[in-house]
Amino acid sequence: MSATLPPLSAAGRIARLREALAGHGIERAVVSGASSRRWLSGFSGSNGDLVVTGDRVVLVTDGRYVAQAERQIAASGAGVDEVEMATTVVEQRRRVDSLCSGPGRVGFESTVWTHAEWSAHGSLDELVPIDSVLTGLRRRKDAAEVARMTEAARLASLALASARIEAGVTEREIRDELESTMRAHGADGPSYETIVASGPENAAMAHHRPTSRALVEGDTVVIDVGALLDGYHSDMTRTFIVGEPSPEQERWYRVLARAQQAGLEAVRAGVGTRDVDAACRAVLAEEGLADLFSHGTGHGVGLDIHEEPFLGRSTESVLATGDVVTVEPGLYRVGAGGMRIEDLVLVTESGHRSLTDFPKDDPCPPSPPTT
Amino acid sequence: MSATLPPLSAAGRIARLREALAGHGIERAVVSGASSRRWLSGFSGSNGDLVVTGDRVVLVTDGRYVAQAERQIAASGAGVDEVEMATTVVEQRRRVDSLCSGPGRVGFESTVWTHAEWSAHGSLDELVPIDSVLTGLRRRKDAAEVARMTEAARLASLALASARIEAGVTEREIRDELESTMRAHGADGPSYETIVASGPENAAMAHHRPTSRALVEGDTVVIDVGALLDGYHSDMTRTFIVGEPSPEQERWYRVLARAQQAGLEAVRAGVGTRDVDAACRAVLAEEGLADLFSHGTGHGVGLDIHEEPFLGRSTESVLATGDVVTVEPGLYRVGAGGMRIEDLVLVTESGHRSLTDFPKDDPCPPSPPTT
């Protein structure tokens, strides 16, 4: 499937980073977080420091990754000058310090380096956090990135459409089937720990992990599933009811679907993230259900499953063209169960384009083809 | 399967932590890392700060986890006095700071807190790293912990015994089958990203991720697989050859098996970790293959897949009764492929007890029952 997707390119990204850093009076930076490092250089290994100075770009990594790094960096068009190999953690640190030495500020990721790592780079004495510079740059997705997230979302929908969601099947069985279908169709894996949360207790937990509980008639079943493709994530939640919905379940689902729709309709470049959250909450409040919505409305998705911008009651950023975000209100009450409906959407000038297309008109489980 | 395992208990652990901290003049500590927090309290959620002071133990977490935390803490016998709920990250930090306020040193995990988190706790101005205190306490596994790792190892062996490892099957198919068999028999999931690395290029990478490459005659196939059970990991590697081994492959395998055996025989309480590494390397050196062994010999395993003690060329710690460690020499050469043999063993007074029991006498793939 990937063969037909437009190639990922990192060309021009390091220039954009340099420009952004210059605006903060920063001339050199070390990028160590896996996602920002990959976004800037194309390198997907688990260890590496990308050092960007005024006139050079060097990736320092260990022996496991040198060959891979050289291949990926060349393919990405990132413009990395060189890969340096370090044989120990201490040597890697020393090389980074040497590349960044000299007067002036050095940018680093304050939310990535542990306190111990920061202490060990003590010779660089004007270390300045640049986390928000990097996450800001990564927000605007290009066509090749959106194509991967769209394809990842398609794989998750396809898996959900063929899942058996019925009395007698356990949460774990549904999880295993979803993950194996996604992989069989080309996903690199699940995008995160797939959530299958059923019945009066489990479904009431927003972050439940699948258990051996078997579904029974009357359950609400929350399924939160996404695929991973070339490092990019998808994210989608649907809620089903096993058997005939009760009047209360019918009402919850209708109100929640309206709240989610209101959130989606609020999405547009220039709108405050908190306004999308408020749009969902207003519908729930009208129906006296606002107290059952215990988390934020959404988050950005890309090389990280949770990234900027976040959409919540008091978030301050404003949506921009190219953001890919979730809209996912939920209702939870222990004893009654829970529901969540989540789509992944690309923010456009005039509104949004949904990357997730699984039906959500009613909470009726999919009817997989019988074999 | 879990039902027959002895119950996990955290009783007495907080007392041992307090005693160890007192030896460093530290009266209060915050434990935020998932594994140490779980080991001390029984709580397995993804967010929480366990605050231990002279007379109180409080777990601060968010709304997702309060009910779970109360249940797990009671079941663990840890002696946590209270669970406090914070509704935001800022409030969680404020509660921790308030519980730890006052004069004197406050222990924290320097390898867990990011620089940004450390900065945000700035009001606690005598913050002292206690990472090695915690990892030191966690080294000595009790019977209930060893029972889980033994069972996890059994699940991985069982999966490997039934895997189809033959020409035409892809690396990913083998990975998927291993993981689904482990789960079907009660594993909570794979212990880490299962490695299936085949042929002259892929098998030469110690940390290869499975691809859609299909096995062909003459391949070496490195399979590194473990199961996760109640938070505890297993870890095992076996190497197989598809079809008839070449004389060179025969020789590599024989030498590697001898090297691994020499490492295992060196394991005993009181022996230096670097001496186990040296025992493996000496056998390889005799045969002129030492240069092809490009990583350390092993690492501790427990609630983390990689934890203290590490066994390498220049590691300084000494093995102690109750350590559970891997012994995993490997040989890698691009163009020829690679081999690794790894067992997970419990260190005893007189030697070791292996938790992994999959045959390794020869590199012949398992013969799963035909169906």
Image (cartoon, coloured by chain):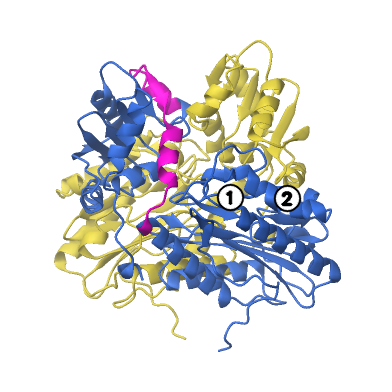
Chain colours: A yellow, B blue
The residue where tag 1 is placed is: A231
Asked if the stretch drawn in magenta spans residue B54, the answer is: no
The answer to whether B14 appears left or right of B201 in the picture is left
Which subunit holds the residue at mark 1?
A
Q: Position of residue A226 (x, y in %)?
A: 47, 57
Q: Looking at this view, is B54 or A65 the one in front?
A: B54
Asked if marks 2 and 1 touch (Cβ < 8 Å), the reply is no
The answer to whether B153 appears left or right of A74 in the picture is left
Look at 48% across and 35% down and name the residue there: A320
Q: Position of residue B122 (x, y in %)?
A: 37, 19
Dividing the picture into quadrants, the one containing residue A285 is top left
The answer to whether B352 appears left or right of A363 in the picture is right
Q: Position of residue B317 (x, y in %)?
A: 55, 39
Find the magenta span and give its range. Answer: B116-143
The quadrant of the image that shows the N terminus of chain B is bottom left
Q: Looking at this view, is A231 or B349 the one in front?
A: B349
Which subunit holds the residue at mark 2?
B
Look at 31% across and 47% down and name the residue there: A262
Q: Looking at this view, is A75 or B51 the one in front?
A: B51
Query: How many angstroms separate mark 2 from mark 1 (CA)?
Result: 37 Å
Q: Secondary structure at mark 2?
A: helix
Q: Secondary structure at mark 1?
A: loop
Which disc, if any, is residue B281? 2
Which disc, if any, is residue A196? none
In the rendered view, would you say A98 is above or below B253? above
